[in-house]
């Protein structure tokens, strides 16, 4: 029923209509969720509640990543409000430690313990240091990023983007590392330094 | 032995291609060259031979072989069976993939409990699993035949549609769906170009080469394993082996691959 409401509310544009019709032919997210609860089991830290969608995941699923502009504005603001900035106002940590977090694709799976091997998996999707040839292309290149986002405004933005990417692009493929408690405040500071410290290989 | 020789061949191919301009491209070429070189003498053969023995072996409390197992083409018929799976089976009243169907036969024919039949479905390099041997053998009996998976039965159609919905369902701490990695053309995760499994082209190239022998760890992996490990990386809980959810995803990709010639079991990175 919820799905039907969303399908109807998308009626404005022809493209949206087409997307809505495709989505409506499929089982609803609630039916998918019920099947996942029946056919999956908790393993280690990967508990069953992980298959439950929050409002954002639900909306990005049923609209195929393209919610209405009004909804995007509203929910991005909600996400922005979830970001907890460092109390001392210092966004920059240790870029060397940040390099390790950026390279690691581990963490949060049923194989690791909670809090263990916390990786950002940044290289899975982004180019960062020009010296590292093994990088993904799902996200934009962040090579020489200090020149793209200079100054304290750049630091605050990078910290916030890693903390909750959805505050800036609601249906982004990038995880919300702070909001999901996947990375700590210090981890995110270290990554911010890896991206913006002039001495970091990213900016060499 | 074969694996070692294969590795040496791959090494030589890598050396020859070391000067290629793009690393990703050269890696792709290496694997293609390896696949060509090993096409006649692939280590996959060893899994198929072992699987043939297991198929014929009298096992379980009933001390019978799997030779009367009906994989959809009639009792004991292997030719083309894999190219038609997953499919609806009237005796169990559900859509089954190869692996869940083998579990069905192990319980109904051989008299094993489901727990016994699924005790060790994923093997390792030291000791592959019976399911891996059997999957390689049976899939190999569809080599050269076109994928022809039916959605005529309402349960088959429902399975396909559930698979499509599952594929696009975003959840978990990292907000991932299958489409996060397998939904956009011409994108890489690290150096790996991931197939767009919602497209005909992507599904065809991929589905027709699974189960697959992985050069990097000398193991033959099944489709159930592939989906299981995707969900691990998706940061989801673990799917039950042979469950409707896993079969629905398999169904989705298999139907998308319909019409393509099955070429597996294949050779992977």
Image: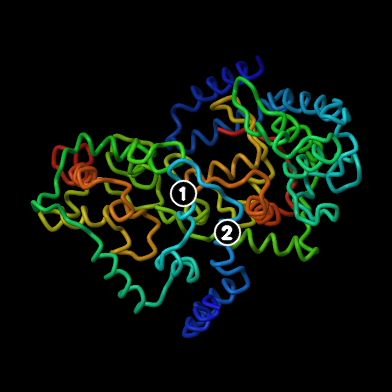
Q: Position of residue B165 (x, y in %)?
A: 58, 63
Above or below for A42 versus B164: above
Query: Horizontally, is B195 left or right of A171 in the view?
Result: right
Q: Nearer the viewer, residue B48 or A150?
A: B48
Query: Horizontally, is A138 left or right of B17 in the view?
Result: left
Q: Position of residue B58 (x, y in %)?
A: 86, 26
Residue at left 51%, top 24%? B16
The disc at residue A164 is none
Residue at left 23%, top 41%? A202
**Other residues around mark 1 within 10 Å, as few (<14) / some (14–19) / many (≥20):** some
> Circle 2 sits on which residue?
B166
> Circle 1 sits on which residue?
A47
Residue at left 68%, top 24%? B43
Q: Position of residue B65 (x, y in %)?
A: 87, 30
Chain for numbered disc 1: A
Q: Which residue reaches farthest top?
A: B1
Chain for numbered disc 2: B
Q: Is residue B184 visible?
A: no
Does label 1 lie on the same chain as label 2? no
Q: Nearer the viewer, residue A51 or A11?
A: A51
Instruction: Tell me the element at label 1.
Output: loop
Above or below for A184 versus A72: above
């Amino acid at each position: 029923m919820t799905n039907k409401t969303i399908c109807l509310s998308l009626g404005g544009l022809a493209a949206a209509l087409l997307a809505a019709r495709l989505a409506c032919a499929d089982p609803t997210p609630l039916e998918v969720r019920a099947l996942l609860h029946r056919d999956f089991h908790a393993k280690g830290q990967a508990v069953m509640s992980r298959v439950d969608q929050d409002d954002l995941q639900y909306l990005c699923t049923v609209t195929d990543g393209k919610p209405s502009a009004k909804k995007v504005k509203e929910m991005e603001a909600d996400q922005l409000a979830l970001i907890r900035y460092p109390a001392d106002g210092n966004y920059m940590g240790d870029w060397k430690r940040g390099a390790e977090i950026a390279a690691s694709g581990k963490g949060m799976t049923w194989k690791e313990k909670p809090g263990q091997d916390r990786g950002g998996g940044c290289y899975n999707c982004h180019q960062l240091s020009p010296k590292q040839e093994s990088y993904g292309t799902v996200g934009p290149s962040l090579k020489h990023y200090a020149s793209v986002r200079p100054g304290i405004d750049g630091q605050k933005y990078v910290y916030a983007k890693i903390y909750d990417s959805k505050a800036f692009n609601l249906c982004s493929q990038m995880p919300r590392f702070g909001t999901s408690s996947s990375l700590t405040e210090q981890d995110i500071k270290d990554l911010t330094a890896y991206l913006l410290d002039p001495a970091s290989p990213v900016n060499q | 032995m074969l694996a070692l020789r294969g590795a040496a061949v791959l090494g030589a191919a890598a050396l020859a291609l070391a000067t290629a301009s793009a690393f990703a491209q050269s890696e792709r070429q290496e694997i293609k060259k390896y696949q060509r070189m090993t096409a006649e003498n692939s280590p996959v053969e060893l899994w198929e031979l072992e699987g043939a023995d297991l198929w014929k072996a009298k096992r379980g409390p009933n001390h019978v072989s799997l030779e009367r197992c009906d994989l959809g083409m009639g009792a004991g018929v292997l030719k083309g069976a894999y190219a038609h799976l997953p499919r609806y089976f009237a005796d169990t009243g559900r859509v089954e993939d190869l692996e869940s169907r083998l579990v069905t036969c192990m319980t109904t024919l051989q008299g094993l409990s489901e727990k016994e039949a699924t005790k060790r479905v994923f093997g390792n390099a030291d000791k592959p699993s019976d399911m891996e041997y059997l999957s390689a053998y049976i899939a190999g009996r569809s080599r050269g035949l076109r994928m022809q998976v039916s959605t005529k039965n309402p349960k088959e159609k429902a399975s396909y549609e559930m698979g499509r919905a599952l594929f696009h369902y975003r959840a978990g701490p990292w907000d991932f769906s299958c489409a996060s990695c397998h939904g956009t053309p011409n994108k890489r995760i690290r150096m790996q170009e991931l197939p767009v499994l919602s497209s005909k082209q992507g599904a065809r190239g991929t589905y027709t080469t699974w189960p697959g022998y992985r050069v990097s760890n000398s193991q033959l992996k099944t489709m159930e394993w592939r989906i299981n490990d995707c969900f691990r990386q998706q940061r989801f809980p673990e799917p039950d082996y042979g469950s409707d959810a896993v079969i629905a995803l398999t169904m989705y990709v298999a139907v998308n691959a319909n019409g393509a010639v099955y070429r597996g079991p294949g050779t992977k990175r």
